[in-house]
Amino acid sequence: MTDIVRSPLADYHASQRTTLGTYHGAWVPCRFSDPRAEHQAVRNASGLLDLSFRACFSMKGKDAVKFLHRMLSNDVLSLAPGQGTYAALLTAHGHIVADLRVFRAEADLWVETDADLRPKLMASLRRYIIGDKVEIEPLEIYSVGFEGPQARRLLEKALHVELPTLDDYGHFAANYAGFPVRVARASNTGEEGYQVWVGAKGMMGVWGGACGQAPTYGTLPCGTEALETLRIEAGIPRYGSELGEDTLPQEARLLHALSFTKGCYVGQEIVERTRSRGHVNWILSGLFVDSAEAPSSGSRFIAAGQPAGEVTSACMSPTLGRTLALAYLRREFAEPGTVLALESGESAEVTSLPFYRRQAS
């Protein structure tokens, strides 16, 4: 049983009468006010998120980069300090043990994943260390997320820094009010997004600094209820809902987590075999559902009386004003425009993902 991580801001949030709950292994805010208003703040201005459900560990030693490169599904060896990538650790059968982000720092590597996945991921990697000079240690740091069209300006004002141009997963070290921080470009909502990693004592300063600037940028603090509707609109899969140890990366459309040129890694043979075959039997898909209520996870779709797929996540979209569902469908039913029905009778139409795509600046 994974211990629940408690946000360093939990007492403060509680004093503000914020609703708290568990999310991916952490005790964090579910909502601060109306989740729909929080959602719209991210889409139209900016949102501030307590991302204490994301956890990091470091990998050090002269073999750390080469070791992680041959373990993960994406290219780690070519990363320079200040760069990062999205990847997965797979089983020998090509299924997803965990999805993660890798950030190469000056002296080590940072690996970020969900708090409830960190113990499993660290243990899985340690089992493969045989004669390698690699040290794996958890990092007691926490993350504040800045998401939305105004996120960059809000972050610069809050931290009193000028952000360099960063590619996805690019990052740099800085200092705020005497606390070391690391800023990374990484979106959790489909909008322009940044994360600020800081120790527990410095987290209140970062949060307070951002809240002090919030009225200028139309910012609202956002909980995990808004985060769920945001990430569903953006078609972002999450472990435990769309990803798991029964899922192949291609089924989940995680091509951006795969390198087809780096050579061998755990599960690579299955990934390559799937690519050469040209398709998977099941594929993560988006559907517009003709219902005022979001179907529950596990609800089944049928076509011509035959099973066609199963809902993994669903919501009423505050942006689109429609009920959305992410589901695994059999590939013969996954073409956009295909009409299916839930077992409960509601009609649904397959559409391309993401449901929502942000406008270029």
Image (cartoon, rainbow, N blue to C red):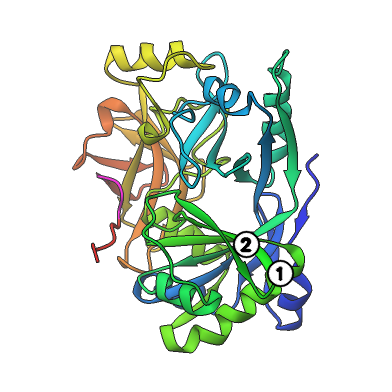
Quarter of the image containing the C terminus? bottom left
Query: Which of the labelled discs sits on residue 181, or is there none?
Result: 2
At x 71%, y 22%, the residue is 133
Horizontal and vertical percent for residue 99? 54, 36
Mark 1, residue position: 202
> Circle 2 — which element?
strand
Quarter of the image containing the N terminus? top right
Most extreme residue toward the left, as rendered? 337
Which residue range is magenta in the image?
Answer: 351-355
Horizontal and vertical percent for residue 107? 63, 41
In this orientation, which residue lies closer to the viewer: 23 or 183?
A: 183
Q: Amino acid at mark 2?
A: Val
Q: Tell me if mark 2 has few (under 14), some (14-19) or many (20+) residues whose alpha carbon lies within 10 angstroms of its own.
A: many
At x 43%, y 74%, the residue is 46
Horizontal and vertical percent for residue 356? 30, 57
In this orientation, which residue lies closer to the viewer: 141 or 290?
A: 141
Q: Is residue 121 left or right of residue 353?
A: right
- The answer to whether the residues at label 2 and label 1 have Cβ atoms under 8 Å apart is yes
